[in-house]
Image: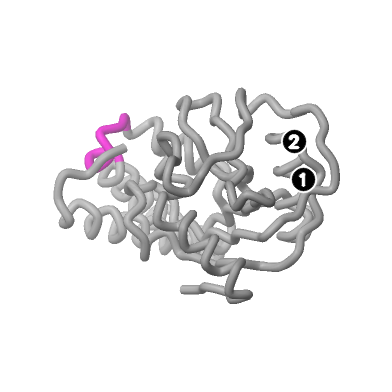
Amino acid sequence: MQADKPSSNRRLEQARRLLALAQTGLHYATGVFDKERYEEIAAIAHAQIADIASMETGKVAELFAFESGYANPKLDVRCAVFNDAGQILLVREAADGLWSLPGGWADVGLSPAENAAKEAREESGYTVEIVRLLAAWDTAKHPHPPSVFHIWKLVFLGEIVRAGDVIGAETDAVAFFDLDRLPSLSLGRIMPAQIRRLDELRRGNKVDFD
């Protein structure tokens, strides 16, 4: 999904906010007419997002079909792993053929750190020990491509315990890269400047947050 003008990002943020209000309203509304009004607001927001994202309205509605209850940002958990040479571990996403840190949506039943370790194991084959949190970012405050979801990203520092086989189906390659020779990245997931910032944070024993 691409936006040609900064105004498109503002419109998308407004549409996402409108949809969040409708979702929360549907959660708390008890009257039939109130529910109908919130459903209409949600339909308007779906149409706005579809127009901005050049998607079919039905596809947008499908993406949000399982979003219910009080509206909250989506939580994306990533694991940053560096080797002794200072290279970063990346995995290639099967969905788009681009590279990213191991990670994904947080699973229910696991802590954020446990999610990060799980994703690293499944997507890269490496069992890691989570050392600490490096960054807590709101993707809306970074120049990621626009997303239909409002996403918070947690990035943990992991240290390799042992190597193994990739057991997930979401990635199809694993490699370490020099920070000044990164491959084509999946920019919705991670950006070059963020990887360099993560290296600064782990060497400076600092945490970055929005």
| In the image: residue 47, left or right of residue 171 | left
Residue lying furthest front in this view?
A: 85
> Mark 2 to mark 1: distance in Å?
6 Å
- For disc 2, the marked residue is 122
60 above or below 149?
A: above
Q: Position of residue 44 (x, y in %)?
A: 29, 48
User: At x 61% / y 33%, what residue is drawn?
Assistant: 175
Q: Toward which corner of the image does residue 19 lie, by quadrant?
A: bottom left
| In the image: residue 11, left or right of residue 205 | left
Label for residue 118? Answer: 1
The colour scheme used to paint the residues is one colour
Q: Please tell me which residue lies in front, 80 or 182.
A: 182
Which secondary structure, mark 2?
A: helix
* Cβ atoms at labels 2 and 1 below 8 Å apart: yes
**Quarter containing the N terminus:** top left
Q: Please tell me which residue lies in front, 2 or 155.
A: 155
User: At x 61% / y 66%, what residue is drawn?
Assistant: 202
User: At x 28% / y 42%, what residue is drawn?
Assistant: 47
Residue 70 visible in the shown view: yes
Task: Give the amino acid type for the residue marked by disc 2 in the picture.
Answer: Glu
Q: Position of residue 52 (x, y in %)?
A: 23, 43
Q: Position of residue 60 (x, y in %)?
A: 39, 37
User: At x 23% / y 39%, what residue is drawn?
Assistant: 51
Specify the segment rendered in magenta.
50-56
